[in-house]
Image (tube, helix red, strand yellow):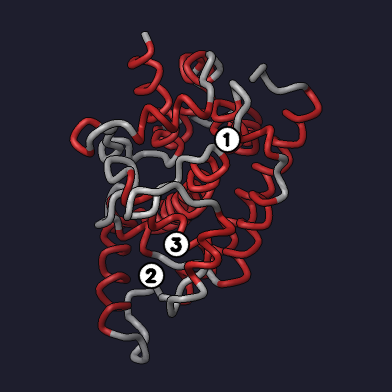
Amino acid sequence: MSPLSSDLRNMLERAIIKARDVAEEAAKAALIALAVRQDTAFKSISDEQRILRNALRVKMRQLGGGSDAQDTGFQLLVEEVAYEQWHRRLFAGFLAENGLLMHPDGVAVSLEECRELAAEKEDTDAWQLAVCYASTMLPGIFRSNDYVAKMQLSPEGQHELERIIMELPPVLFTADDTLGWVYQFWQTKRKKEVNHSGRKIGGADLSPRHSAFHRALHGPVPARKFARCLVGCSPSNQPSSEKFHLSPFYRGWHTSRWYLSRLA
């Protein structure tokens, strides 16, 4: 496929900006509902929710640089949760649209087939099943023990993100440069905020301003080849994103950069 036309690129940018707004609003509401920002947990939460809350509070302090930076840590945690929820769904969509989303039995499945399979199970839907399959295929990227990923958005938030993906035209999932633009557009609003703030740039702000990221992401990255490259690797050889904890954007950049290095 050729690179995206300007019209398709503009369409994609609007969709990604909308997705980030929706994801962050839903992530913030979910974290507040779990009392992650509060010192005391709600008495009504389950043991499983309590474990999740404690793990997320640890993550929040890590992101904020210590217990005295709770506000900063909470906002960064919101961004982490939002990105993780969006990215898992989007990548499952990329795999499905390219015929590379694999059932555990080893056959490719579409989102429609995931919907039929989900109807036979309890407490799941087509997208949750697709994300589960993608996570099983790519454990080096989608870590099963990641508490940030275990945070569930409200049904309304989940459905809105899924709607945004489903409304994207199929050509966007197979064009040469879509993946690069996806990660770039996720940072569009933040880049503008950083550029207009005049404040000193920190680790969480670095990604939208670093020209090396732009060059890495806007090379020839065909989505189908990217997906095949990842799926064909053993879990031990897939890119690990653990060290890229300063900004959710690093996960996308690291994955794309790893892919480019394999093509060199």
The residue pinned by badge 3 equals: 129
The residue pinned by badge 1 equals: 187
**Alpha-carbon span between mark 1 and mark 2:** 25 Å
Helix, strand or loop at label 3? It is: helix
* Residue furthest out toward the bottom: 44
Work out whether 155 lies above or below 73.
below
Residue drawn at point x = 62 percent, y = 33 percent: 185
Q: Nearer the viewer, mark 1 or mark 2?
A: 1
Residue drawn at point x = 52 percent, y = 45 percent: 96
Measured as percent of width and height from the top left, residue 120 is found at 46, 76
Measured as percent of width and height from the top left, residue 182 is found at 58, 34
Measured as percent of width and height from the top left, residue 105 is found at 32, 54
* Residue furthest out toward the left: 236
The residue pinned by badge 2 equals: 36
Residue drawn at point x = 30 percent, y = 70 percent: 52
Name the residue nearer the viewer: 51 or 120.
Answer: 120
**Alpha-carbon span between mark 3 and mark 2:** 27 Å
Work out whether 239 lies above or below 146.
above
Looking at the image, tell me whether mark 3 or mark 2 is earlier in sequence order.
2
**What's the residue type where badge 3 is placed?**
Leu
